[in-house]
Amino acid sequence: MGRVISSVRHDEPELARERSLLRRKTAKQFTRLAVAELQTRCVILFGSTAKGTDGLDSDVDVIVIGGQLPADYFARGIRVNRLRPKRGAPMNVFAYSEDEFERMLANCHVTALDAMYEGIPLYGKRYFNRLKRKFDDLVKAGWRRTRAAWIRVPEGN
């Protein structure tokens, strides 16, 4: 009679929970480095990890606002991406000056709107709350999130 060899298989919900914890740990490690290296004003976790809808293969979406960021957008991307933890979950890091992000919010840029709608401040909660009040004013003016986009709903609808 032959031996039956069974392979150990992680339960998918348990694996999903472990990866979700890894994503949050990665975001926190990155935040500590960004604050120390860049003296950033605010770090916002957004996307599926912030919403709690992350799946097995989700990444971490983070916005860095302010601090000692290079003026050139591409140099800035290189600088902030070097701060990503060597081990951990994959990350998408977006970096903006305070003026850039505030203009994006005022102009209803989808990234800024999503960050304020679903975002969690990992650092700079006071500044985040100030931005959130501006976002709330946009919502009062009729801006709404649909499944696919942000739209402005006319008054009375």
Image (cartoon, rainbow, N blue to C red):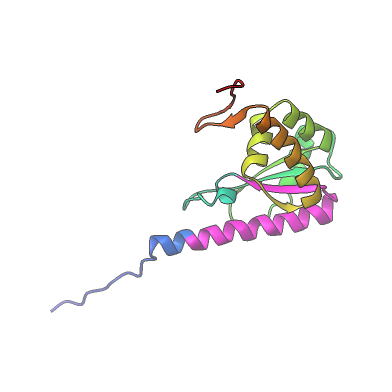
Horizontal relation, residue 150 to residue 7: left or right: right
Horizontal relation, residue 74 to residue 140: left or right: right
Is residue 114 positioned above or below 121 on the image? above
Q: Nearer the viewer, residue 107 or 92?
A: 107
Horizontal relation, residue 103 to residue 89: left or right: right
Which residue is at a point 69% across and 35% down the rendered structure image? 112
Q: Nearer the viewer, residue 55 or 139?
A: 139
Does the segment drawn in magenta span residue 155? Answer: no
Is residue 155 positioned above or below 113 on the image? above
Which residue is at a point 87% across and 44% down the rendered structure image? 68
As drawn, the residue found furthest toward the front would be 156
Find the magenta span and give its range: 17-46
Does the segment drawn in magenta span residue 30? Answer: yes
In which quadrant is the N terminus drawn?
bottom left
x, y percent for residue 120: 67, 50
Residue 66 location, quadrant = top right
Q: Main secondary structure of the magenta part?
A: helix
Which residue is at a point 28% across and 71% down the rendered structure image? 6
Residue 78 in sight from this viewpoint: yes
